[in-house]
Amino acid sequence: MIERMLKKMEAAMSSRLRVTTLLDDQSMVLTTTTMWDGKEVHSHEFDMMPLVLAIESRIGRCSKCKK
């Protein structure tokens, strides 16, 4: 019975809760946004450039676009 109630709550929450993740390929900023009932409740921005530079230094540049 408790399991059924939890599944119903989970289904109700999943229709109200949305999390989006966007990566701006120009600035290399990753933004995650949490929304509840269509209203933004939390957001984070992560600078991904240090990660990109670390990867490039380990594996080199893209052979297709030379960037």
Image (tube, grey):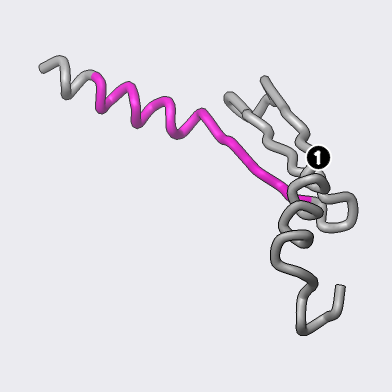
On the rendered structure, is 1 left or right of 14?
A: left
Seen as rendered, the residue at the extreme left is: 1
- Which residue appears at 66% of the width and 43% of the height? 21
Most foreground residue, 8 or 58: 58
Looking at the image, is 40 positioned above or below residue 55?
above
Q: Does the segment drawn in magenta span residue 22?
A: yes
- Please state, as top left, top right, bottom left or bottom right, where the C terminus lies in the image: bottom right
Q: Could you say whether the residue bearing mark 1 is in a helix, strand or loop?
A: strand
The amino acid type found where label 1 is placed reads Asp
Callout 1 environment at 10 Å: few (<14), some (14 to 19), or many (20+)? some
- Which residue appears at 25% of the width and 27% of the height? 7
Most foreground residue, 21 or 15: 21
Q: Whole-percent x and y of residue 23?
A: 75, 50
Looking at the image, is 61 positioned above or below residue 14?
below
Q: Whole-percent x and y of residue 11?
A: 35, 31
Snapshot quadrant of residue 57: bottom right
Q: Whole-percent x and y of residue 41?
A: 67, 20
Q: Does the segment drawn in magenta span residue 52?
A: no
- Which span is picked out in magenta? 6-23
- State the residue position of label 1: 47
Looking at the image, is 42 positioned above or below residue 60?
above
- Please state, as top left, top right, bottom left or bottom right, where the N terminus lies in the image: top left
Snapshot quadrant of residue 61: bottom right
- Which residue appears at 85% of the width and 79% of the height? 66
On the rendered structure, is 56 left or right of 41?
A: right
Most foreground residue, 49 or 22: 49
On the rendered structure, is 38 left or right of 50?
A: left
Seen as rendered, the residue at the extreme front is: 58
Seen as rendered, the residue at the extreme bottom is: 64
